[in-house]
Amino acid sequence: MIVADLGRGNMGEVMLAEDTLLGRRVAIKRLHAELLGDPRHRERLRNEARIAVQFDHPAIVRVLDLLCEDGADHIVMEYIPGPSLRALRNRGALAISYVVQIACELTDALQHVHACGVIHRDLKLENVLTTRDGRPKLNDFGVACSAECIDGPGEIVGTPRAMSPEQVAGEPIDPRSDLFSLGVLLYELVAGASPFAAEGPIETMQRVLHDLAPSLAEAHPDVPPALASLVDHLLAKDPAHRPQSANEVAVRLRALIPGRCLSSASTSRTTCPEAHASRPGGSSARACSG
Ligand SMILES: Nc1ncnc2c1ncn2[C@@H]1O[C@H](COP(=O)(O)OP(=O)(O)O)[C@@H](O)[C@H]1O
Ligand SMILES: [Mg+2]
């Protein structure tokens, strides 16, 4: 039973639903009505469900099922009641210690995603939700890429202000592309503004390709120098000049404020669960045919 609208993105609309049989609330995502007839978008939604269902991590939204209702696919997910990081940041500046805690947990989540051979490709404030107690949950694997990407020839997917230079250039990408996006996300979380903000998407992509981000340390002297320099490092144009893995970022974050990441570290899963089909509660994937 649908209870309320939860939100809309570029591709989907998400509703809160009451599972009356099991007495729980779930979130249900389906394509916007105008995209329903487009087989490419339908495949993207299925791809999102197939990719996200394999993750087993406390900082990643859990996918429960893929159902066909009224001829349309619906992803059933755990319901995350808190605001997105975008909504949270719009309310005002966050304590640096909290930013670091979020960064630790998100980096753990990225380690897990990358260990599963997946690149998220759309990591940004809007795609991280928060739990009632303020912990981050990585969401929206709508353009994530695993062994096969479903982009058309020459198609560039992602959000211009959060894309890596290699993504903007349409070059092959690897997990270090998500690390650049993590740098943008952390910059925005601290500064409240995008490092590459510009008039329109083309100008933004030009800035991502060519401009250095304004220094976080200068604009925000209260930011620990080690955090500002980590963000600078993540925003390196050349992937070879960035931290080389989410693991490397996690180590640096943990060194930043000892003890802050303990709860996340103790639950971190850096390996990928294999045969997710056999996982208890795993998706039964009853997608629409065709
Ligand atoms: N599991 C969830 N629990 C609660 N709200 C959600 C959930 N998933 C998505 N939402 C809401 O719906 C919005 C759009 O979801 P998203 O998956 O990002 O769609 P899109 O792929 O179109 O960008 C989110 O910003 C959030 O407000
Ligand atoms: Mg989204």
Image: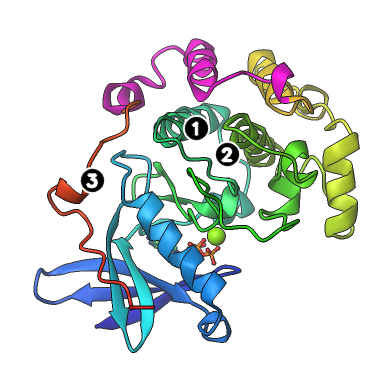
**Residue behind mark 2:** 94
Q: Is the magenta stretch mostly helix, strand or loop?
A: helix
Q: Mark 3 points at which residue?
A: 276
Q: For this rendering, which residue is in front, 286 or 128? A: 286
Query: Going 34% across and 45% down the picture, which residue do you hit?
Result: 133
Whether the magenta-drawn stretch holds residue 110 is answered as no
Foreground mark, 3 or 2?
3
Q: Would you say the residues marked 1 and 2 are in contact, meaning their CB atoms lie under 8 Å apart? A: yes
Pointer 1: what residue? 98
Q: Does residue 218 appear to the left or right of 91 in the view shown?
A: right
Q: Is mark 1 on a helix, strand or loop?
A: helix
Position of residue 264 relative to residue 93, above or below, is: above
Give the residue at x 27% y 28%: 267
Crowd around label 1: few <14 · some 14–19 · many ≥20 (10 Å): few
Mark 3 or mark 2, which has the lower sequence index? Answer: 2
Q: What span is colored magenta in the figure? A: 239-268
Percent of width and height locating residue 109: 42, 35
Image location of residue 132, percent across then percent down: 34, 51
Give the amino acid at mark 3: His
Q: Which residue is drawn at 72% across and 43% down?
A: 167
Disc on res. 265:
none
Mark 1 residue type: Tyr
* SS state under label 3: helix
Question: Quarter holding the C terminus?
Answer: bottom left
Q: Does the residue labelled 1 lie within 8 Å of ligand 1?
A: no
Structural crowding at the residue carrying mark 2, measured as other residues with C-alpha within 10 Å and reported as few (<14), some (14–19) or many (≥20): some
Colouring scheme applied when the structure was drawn: rainbow
Q: Is 232 left, or right, of 76 in this rendering?
A: right
Q: Is residue 289 or residue 77 the one in the foreground? A: 289
